[in-house]
Image: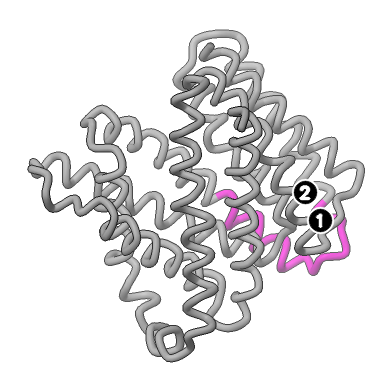
Amino acid sequence: MPAPLLFVVSGLTLYVGAAVAVGLFDSIGAPAVGWWRIVLSALVLLAWRRPWRRRWTRRQLAWAAAFGVALSAMNVVFYVGIDHLPLGVAVALEFCGPVAVAAITGRGWAERGAILVAAGGVVLLAGVTLESDLPRQDVLVGLAAIGAAAVCWAGYIVLGKRVAGAGTGLDSLAVGMAAGALVFAPAFGHTVDDVVLDPRMLLFLLVVAVCSSVVPYVLDQLVLRRVGTAAFSVLTALLPATAVVVGAVVLRQIPTWPELAGLALVSGAIAMTARARV
């Protein structure tokens, strides 16, 4: 399978998992679904990687834990966002986090220009969403949650570079997810009885965890081995469009033309920052 097509499969899997998660929000709440995604992903990765076999320094463990807490927080608030906003719009707005990191850390004109292009997309998407038929309270909560998710994603990228520099890879991801699950357990641990005693819900949550965390990460590693980080970065510009397709097909969230224009601007900003790293 060609690497770009493999990347598209990864994106589709990621957002199909998110679409499945939406169907569980009425049962235990969107934030709790986000927490369960981390819990079950951590269990899968811990069973697979068995990171305790590696020698860890306190510094490595601390960075892995911080990385995992940022990832967990991003998941929790992202699910709050897609509980109130269309999936494609939420994904596009969340990408402002990575674009901002590239703009702040980059030195070329492309990075600086990308933040302006992304800002135009955000203004368009937020304006269209505010004027849509969605309840205004839902829109405001959704925009605030996605804004928080974008900030968490930016932190996740910065911390991820630290973790990657330690050379622990998937083992750090497993440790980090376990740490994130524990940190948020006091807030969402009360849902354990509801989930464990309902095999059907537990199965769907496992599908969410595997589709949205485990499979995309593994496929992304395969793509990186084939095309390298530069081409991979450019491919990330496809993700907002992928989310729109999944939202339209699975959730019947048909985007308007102004929304598509905003999505195109954000995707263009992603491509600009990626090109700057080539």
Image label count: 2
Give the residues drawn in magenta, as a range.
129-147
Query: Which residue of the protein is positioned furthest toward the right in this rendering?
Result: 257
Of the residues shown, which amino acid type is indicated by label 1?
Answer: Ala
208 relative to 195 in the view: left or right: right
| Mark 1 lies on residue | 248
Q: Residue visible at 78% across and 44% down?
A: 125
Mark 2 near mark 1, Cβ–Cβ under 8 Å?
yes
The image position of residue 239, as x and y in percent, is: 65, 39
The alpha-carbon separation of the residues under discs 2 and 1 comes to 5 Å
Residue 143 - label: none
Quadrant of res 40: bottom left
> Horizontal and vertical percent for residue 174?
29, 52
Predominant secondary structure in magenta? Answer: helix
x 19%, y 50%: residue: 51
- Label 2 sits on a secondary structure element that is helix
Answer whether residue 149 is magenta in the image: no
Q: Where's residue 35, x and y in %?
A: 43, 67
Kind of residue at disc 2: Val
Residue count near mark 2 (Cα–Cα under 10 Å), binned few <14, some 14–19, many ≥20: many
Q: Which residue is mark 2?
A: 245
Which of 200/18 is in front? 200
